[in-house]
C-alpha cells in the first residue's frame, strides 16, 4: 500500500501485547441480562435453553480459536482460557478480546432460534476483558472462584425461587426471608419446606459448564503424554459439568496446562 502523509496517525495506536508465557483468560458477560431474561420470559431460577445456547456459542469460539484449551461458563458469562504459549495475533489484547466477544455474540444470535421459540425481542451484547494469570495455581484459583460463585448463586436462586413459586412469597418477602442465612440453612429450607434435596439438582446448574479439548480415549496409556499443537487441534470438544476445584480434573488432563 502506498504511504500517505496521513499515515503518521498510526503511531497513536497503543501497543497491547499481553505478557508472554502467562495464561490469558478472556471473560465475556451478557449486558443487562437481568432485564433480557425477563423480556424473554426465562424460566427461573435456571433456563436450560439459554445455558445450552451459551454452551453452543462457546463451542463455536473454541472451534475457531484452537489455542483456547478450556472454557468455563455459567449464567450469562463465559471464561476462555488460552494456552500460555499462544502467539495468535501476537497476543494483542484488543484483537483477542474483540474477536472472542463478537464471535460469541454472533453465534448466540445465530443459534437463538434453535433453542427458543420466542423470537429475539432485543439485541444481546456481551462485554469482554482479558486477565493474565502467571501460573497454574492462580489460574486454578480464578476458575475455582467462578465455580464457587456459580454454586453460591445457584443455591441462593434455587431457594429464592422455591419460596416464590412453591411457597407463594413475594420477591421482597423471599429476599427478607433469606437475608443472613448460611448455606446449610438454605439446604434445610429447600428440604423441609419443599422436599427438594439440593444435591439432586442438575449438575449443570450446580457446577456450570466446562468445555475441554480431549483425546477420544482419556484412559489410554498415553494419558500423561504431552500433545503437540497439531494433535490438540484434532481433539474433540467435550462438555462437562464436574468439579474443576478437585485435583482429579487436572491430574487426569495434564495436557490442558502446557
Ligand atoms: P451486567 O450488564 O452488569 O452484567 P446483568 O443484568 O447481566 O448486568 P449479571 O450479574 O451478569 O447482571 O447477572 C446475570 C443475570 O441474568 C442474573 O439475574 C441471572 O439470574 C440471569 N440469567 C442469566 N442466565 C440465566 C438463565 N439461563 N436462566 C435464568 N436466568 C439467567
Ligand atoms: P483481517 O482479518 O486481517 O482483517 P481481512 O481479509 O478482513 O483480514 P482487510 O484488510 O480487513 O482483510 O480487508 C478486507 C477485505 O474485504 C478486502 O479484501 C476488501 O476488498 C474486502 N471487502 C470488504 N468490504 C467489501 C465490500 N463491501 N465489497 C467488496 N469487498 C469488500
Ligand atoms: Mg456483571
Ligand atoms: Mg451480565
Ligand atoms: Mg453475569
Ligand atoms: Mg478485516
Image (spheres, rainbow, N blue to C red):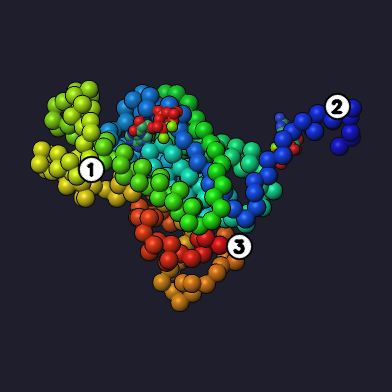
| Residue at the disc numbered 1 | 183
Q: Would you say residue 66 is visible in this rendering?
A: no
User: Quarter of the image containing the C terminus?
Assistant: bottom right
* Mark carried by residue 60: none
Looking at the image, which residue is at 72% across and 39% down?
A: 15
Left or right, 44 with respect to 208, comes to: left
| Residue at the disc numbered 2 | 6
Instruction: Tell me if mark 2 has few (under 14), some (14-19) or many (20+) residues whose alpha carbon lies within 10 angstroms of its own.
Output: few
* Element under disc 2: loop
Assess mark 2: CB under 8 A from ligand 2? no
Left or right, 110 with respect to 65, comes to: left
Assess mark 1: CB under 8 A from ligand 1? no
Looking at the image, which residue is at 74% across and 33% down?
A: 13
User: Quarter of the image containing the N terminus?
Assistant: top right
Q: CA distance from mark 3 to mark 1?
A: 43 Å
Quarter of the image where one finds residue 66: bottom right
* Residue 52 image offset from top left, x and y in percent: 38, 43
* Element under disc 3: helix
Looking at the image, which residue is at 43% across and 56% down?
A: 238
* Residue 75 image offset from top left, x and y in percent: 38, 38
Instruction: Tell me if mark 3 has few (under 14), some (14-19) or many (20+) residues whose alpha carbon lies within 10 angstroms of its own.
Output: few
Spot the residue most to the left: 192
Q: CA distance from mark 2 to mark 1?
A: 62 Å
| Residue at the disc numbered 3 | 229
Amino acid at each position: 500500500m502506498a504511504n500517505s502523509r496521513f499515515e503518521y496517525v498510526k503511531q497513536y495506536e497503543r501497543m497491547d501485547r499481553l505478557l508472554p508465557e502467562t495464561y490469558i483468560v478472556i471473560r465475556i458477560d451478557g449486558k443487562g441480562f437481568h432485564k433480557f431474561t425477563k423480556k424473554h420470559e426465562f424460566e427461573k431460577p435456571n433456563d436450560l435453553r439459554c445455558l445450552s445456547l451459551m454452551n453452543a456459542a462457546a463451542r463455536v469460539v473454541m472451534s475457531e480459536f484452537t489455542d483456547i484449551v478450556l472454557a468455563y461458563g455459567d449464567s450469562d458469562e463465559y471464561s476462555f482460557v488460552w494456552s500460555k504459549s499462544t502467539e495468535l495475533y501476537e497476543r494483542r489484547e484488543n484483537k483477542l478480546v474483540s474477536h472472542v466477544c463478537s464471535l460469541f455474540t454472533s453465534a448466540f444470535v445465530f443459534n437463538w432460534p434453535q433453542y427458543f421459540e420466542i423470537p429475539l425481542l432485543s439485541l444481546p451484547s456481551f462485554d469482554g476483558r482479558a486477565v493474565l494469570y502467571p501460573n497454574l495455581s492462580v489460574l486454578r484459583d480464578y476458575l475455582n472462584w467462578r465455580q464457587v460463585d456459580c454454586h453460591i448463586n445457584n443455591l441462593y436462586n434455587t431457594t429464592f425461587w422455591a419460596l416464590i413459586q412453591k411457597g407463594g412469597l413475594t420477591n421482597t418477602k423471599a429476599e427478607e426471608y433469606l437475608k443472613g442465612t448460611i448455606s446449610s440453612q438454605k439446604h434445610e429450607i429447600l428440604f423441609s419446606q419443599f422436599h427438594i434435596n439440593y444435591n439432586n439438582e442438575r449438575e449443570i446448574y450446580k457446577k456450570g459448564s466446562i468445555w475441554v479439548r480431549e483425546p477420544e480415549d482419556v484412559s489410554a496409556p498415553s494419558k500423561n503424554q504431552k500433545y503437540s499443537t497439531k494433535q490438540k487441534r484434532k481433539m474433540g470438544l467435550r462438555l462437562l459439568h464436574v468439579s474443576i476445584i478437585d485435583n482429579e480434573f487436572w491430574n487426569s488432563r495434564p495436557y490442558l496446562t502446557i
